[in-house]
Amino acid sequence: MLQQKLLQRKKLPKKFNNILRNNPPRHFVPFALRMTETQLVRGRRLSPELAFPVKRWRKWSLFANYDKILKKIQKGWLNILSLELFNDLTRKKEVFTPIKEGQVSFYSCGPTVYDYFHVGNARPFIVFDVLRRWLEHEGYKVTFVQNFTDIDDKMIHRAHQEKITVPELAERFIAEYQKDADALGIRRPDVAPRATEHIDEIIHTIEKIIANGHAYVSDGDVYFDIKSWPKYGSLCKQNLEDLEAGARIEPGEKKKDPLDFALWKAEKPGEPSWESPWGKGRPGWHIECSAMSSKYLGENIDIHSGGVDLMFPHHENEAAQSEAASGNGKPFVNYWLHNGFLLIDSEKMSKSLGNFLTARAAIEKYPPLALRFFMLSAHYRSPINFTPEGLEQAAAGVSRLRNCKSDLDFAARTRKDNNADFDINKYLDELKELHKKFSDAMNDDFNTAAAMGILFDVVYLINTTLKENEKLPEEFFTASKKALDEYDEILGVIGSDDAETEHDDESAEIEKLIKERTEARKSKNFARSDEIRNLLKSRGIVLEDTPQGTKWKRELA
């Protein structure tokens, strides 16, 4: 193994040997232990400070600045993760290197709050929630920003239909979004800016774009001048001629080129508007993300994510206007990430096809955790086919995970014995190996599909161990619970049920009824025993009688 080769090198300083042998902080794993010999020799997957030219394994040299690197590792300043992300800007996997050591600036496109968000929107909200969790798990300080688009044509049209104001519509559906997102286990962003609360920042951004020669005013509208930006199309990988072939100028638009897009729209009767240097009006759709991301994350950010449908024109326009505004020559985003389409019965979701489904409707029909499980069961860049069978399988998967946790908790209360004849070291080694595989999967472009498979390997290991051993030591239960909790903290697909639920008062009542049922069975009062079982079942509580006693769990809601 590479670790052994490194430890046997006579030229390695003794202090470095100690680093390799000891367990460093989990997010600062010594680079040599995470790489193949070939990767090390070629200087791949190394942070710039560690990458050094090596032609052959036998001729590799020691670090010239070893003491400096040692101090950084010990203090947690040197991040040598091997996380790779597929960057849509370069169309290849790249080692993730944040702009600032140990920090990640992360912007993800949020919903336009004119209606409930649909299951296609749920996918990026869920998968990029997991990426955020993984980065935090690995020790990064993540600043996660997700916006609310609370002014656009759809908002105005819906508000007119319902005879309410646009702000009233926005307030209503922001609350509905949060309700559904909470049900799906999507964590709240650090910052959730609204477009209408950042009009000054939007106007200032547009002013900079005009001053830098990349936008023009036309009868109160302001348009981005595509021809002034040679890089346009670099994200979607199309040239201007191909893009222009499908573009057209809408009636009332006075722009130079069909591809030019609105940064500011002049006031129209019955529409919300704000004062600006170009007259009253409202912002275009794309500009809000540039203004808000630069305010909260800076002009150059680490990660920007969204659905693949946003790559063009939204993200292409975002990149162009953001870089045109900054004028500093730096890219707006270092890593562009996009999830694949969600299909409904192998067809793209569309209201015209009658297969449009909101997340609210989906979680009323299926358990929310099953929907989350389903979204993570495929690699985020692959298309995923949404079918009833797929959701039922996902629900069964969640039940299996929760049953494992429930069985483990029950066994910890009834079968714990520190004198049990059990090879705990072998078990811990197996858990450790699975943990490494899980980390490798997540570091490989956060492959949640592979990570979920490894989670089920952990479940199989726990279940098999419980089945084959009547008594088990406390260390088994502690390590197993820690493993399940850690994976759930990242994936969020287990949740809590049984006695560990937060419904403490209800749990006490359930335990009291179970005790009464046990006494009824002992006295052969089977009518009362059945009555209690049926009562609990009507409340979503399932009982299971075992040789160690009666265990209970909540049905997956």
Image (cartoon, rainbow, N blue to C red):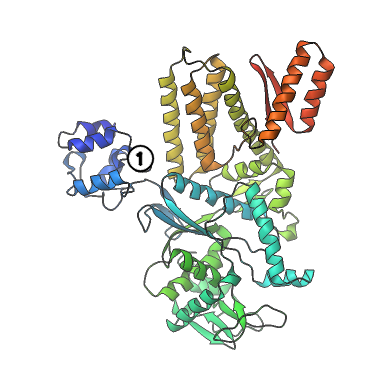
Tag count in the figure?
Answer: 1
Relative vertical location of residue 206 with respect to residue 189 in this rendering, above or below:
below
Instruction: Choose between 520 and 219: the one closer to the eye.
Output: 520
Instruction: Choose between 372 and 172: the one closer to the eye.
Output: 172
Asked if residue 255 lies left or right of residue 52, the reply is right
Relative vertical location of residue 422 with respect to residue 269 in this rendering, above or below:
above
Mark 1 is on which residue type?
Answer: Pro
Residue at 63 percent of width and 47 percent of height: 184
Instruction: Choose between 550 and 42: the one closer to the eye.
Output: 550
Residue at 61 percent of width and 66 percent of height: 149
Q: Which residue position holds label 1?
A: 25
Residue 494, image x, y percentages: 59, 37
Residue at 63 percent of width and 49 percent of height: 182
Residue at 60 percent of width and 72 percent of height: 196
Estimate how packed mark 1 is, as few (under 14), some (14 to 19) or many (20 or more) residues with alpha carbons within 10 Å: some
Residue 485, image x, y percentages: 52, 35
Residue 91, image x, y percentages: 44, 57
Q: Secondary structure at mark 1?
A: loop
Asked whether residue 449 is in view, the answer is: no
Q: Residue furthest left?
A: 11
Instruction: Give the position of the N terminus as an image quadrant.
Output: top left
